[in-house]
Image (cartoon, helix red, strand yellow):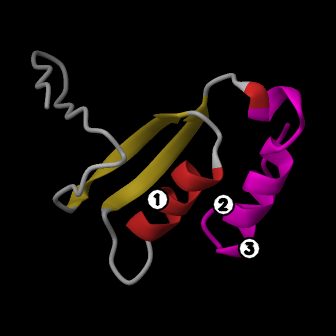
């Protein structure tokens, strides 16, 4: 865990770890676009609210090159996690 001070508070944690809920803060996810990672994001907002909101940023990888990102975004939309007005 890393604390960045002066202008804002940030905690950097692996999505694979069990994390304490932070419902007063928004999360920024910086992830490879994999089914495993998307399922962890969905889990963070199912049955309880891990964070007040989320900002998703997918970094490049084979999933982006082969177009699999569309399937992952559809999965997020189907779970009502992502507004369908996203842009590619």
* The quarter of the displayed image where residue 79 is located: bottom right
Q: Residue furthest bottom?
A: 47
Label 3: element kind? helix
* Quarter containing the N terminus: top left
Residue drawn at x 19%, y 26% as measured from the top left: 8
Q: What's drawn in magenta, residue-wise?
A: 63-88
Q: Is residue 79 above or below residue 18?
A: below
Residue 55: horizontal and vertical position, in percent? 51, 43
User: Is residue 50 found left or right of 77 in the rendered image?
Assistant: left
**Residue position marked by numbered label 1 in the rendering:** 40
**Residue position marked by numbered label 3 in the rendering:** 78
Residue 59: horizontal and vertical position, in percent? 62, 25
Residue drawn at x 52%, y 66% as measured from the top left: 42
Residue drawn at x 15%, y 20% as measured from the top left: 4
- Looking at marks 2 and 1 on the same chain, the residue that comes earlier in the sequence is marked by 1
Label 2: element kind? loop
Residue drawn at x 25%, y 32% as measured from the top left: 12
**Residue position marked by numbered label 2 in the rendering:** 82
Within 10 Å of the Cα at label 1, are there few (<14), some (14-19), or many (20+) other Cα atoms?
some
- Looking at marks 3 and 1 on the same chain, the residue that comes earlier in the sequence is marked by 1
């Amino acid at each position: 865990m890393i604390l960045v001070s002066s202008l804002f508070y940030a905690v950097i944690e692996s999505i694979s770890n069990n994390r304490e809920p932070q419902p007063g803060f928004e999360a920024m996810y910086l992830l490879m676009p994999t089914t495993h990672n998307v399922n962890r994001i969905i889990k963070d907002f199912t049955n309880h609210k891990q964070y007040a909101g989320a900002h998703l940023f997918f970094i490049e990888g084979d999933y982006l090159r082969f177009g699999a990102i569309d399937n992952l975004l559809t999965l997020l939309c189907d779970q009502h996690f992502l507004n369908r007005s996203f842009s590619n």
